[in-house]
Image (spheres, rainbow, N blue to C red):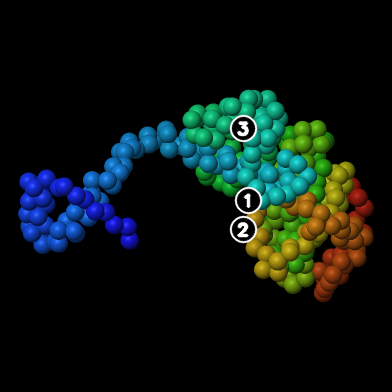
Amino acid sequence: MPKIQARNIDEALYQRIEASAMKHERSLEGEIRIALRDYYTPVEAETSPLSLRERWQQQTGERLQWLFDQLVADGVLDQWQGERPAGIADIVRIARQLGTSPGQLMDLLEGRKEMLPAMADELAGRFSASADWLLSGTDTPFPVLRIGHGYRDFLLPEDDDGQNVFEFIRIDGGHHDGTLIIIRVNARTQALSVGVVTSGFILARGMGGGGHGYLKEFLLFLKTKCHRLAINTFDFKPDDPEFDFWSVIGQHHPIWFRNAKQRSTASWLQQLYSGTDPADWFEGWQSDLDEIAMVPFGGETKIE
């Protein structure tokens, strides 16, 4: 330990130190050590607590930084995915896409300015993010609609301009084998919407009568009511057998599911249309497949 020696101490000061040491039942050296510590310990400046508005601006900036980092990681800003924080060049690129200044985005990131709803909506529309999440932290960063039995509204929305292209992505393996993710892409605006079938059926074997009934209804609806839609089908192979679907859905930009290392084109929908079972999905239910094959594209069925 470092040592300090002091000479020519004033007698009166020495006596005061000695009296203080006796009072506190400490050695003279211990008394001096504590006195030096107390004297030279820096006094922390008192900071006033943040106001409610300042806390909100700070938290909004943190969410915006997370969004920009995730856009980089998912390969939205360029073709290369990478775990790195969004830098100045990324912020400038985003600002150009939004038609705003990089400085304004930097002020938002650092919590110096408040994010207006119009800016949140612009970011959400441009990057398939959630404006509610940006402004309040509720919902997920990237909205996911649990379409379940409501696939009709997702596939044929009321504001359909005829420009929608659909990507049907089947999870191939893991705990969520057979789960169907649907990405709707507007070819004119490039807006992306994500839906997931979390109930009703799976595209795998092992379903009961109810699941097969829902899947049959879904396929007949596609063949008769959606025959004019542009639908591309894929398999998404998780790189981890313990893949947890719910840990990634809503936490990644939809482009994450286009990773060529894990996604490949598939023909399971065409097979089902023609009455061919891709992998024993209809084991014991071949009559349902035969019925689907008999229905012409754009034809009429009891399924409405």
Q: Residues within 10 Å of mark 2 (few under 14, many from 20)?
A: few
Judging by the rendered image, the residue that carries numbered circle 3 is 121
How far across and down, in percent of the image, does residue 300 sit? 87, 50
Q: Residues within 10 Å of mark 3 (few under 14, many from 20)?
A: some
Residue drawn at (66%, 60%) of the image: 245
User: Mark 1 vs mark 3: which is more N-terminal?
Assistant: 3
**Up/down of 294 relative to 225, above or below:** below
Q: In the image, what residue type sits under mark 3?
A: Asp
Between the residue at mark 3 and the residue at mark 2, the CA separation in whole angstroms equals 25 Å
- Foreground mark, 1 or 3? 1
Q: Residues within 10 Å of mark 1 (few under 14, many from 20)?
A: some
Residue drawn at (8%, 47%) of the image: 11
How far across and down, in percent of the image, does residue 284 sit? 82, 74
Q: In the image, what residue type sits under mark 1?
A: Gln
- Side (left or right) of 159 relative to 67: right
- Side (left or right) of 157 relative to 298: left
Q: Secondary structure at mark 3?
A: helix
Residue drawn at (23%, 46%) of the image: 39
CB under 8 Å between discs 1 and 3: no
Res. 247 mark? 2
Q: In the image, what residue type sits under mark 2?
A: Ser
- Side (left or right) of 197 relative to 12: right
Judging by the rendered image, the residue that carries numbered circle 1 is 251
Between the residue at mark 1 and the residue at mark 2, the CA separation in whole angstroms equals 7 Å
Q: Secondary structure at mark 2?
A: helix
CB under 8 Å between discs 1 and 2: yes
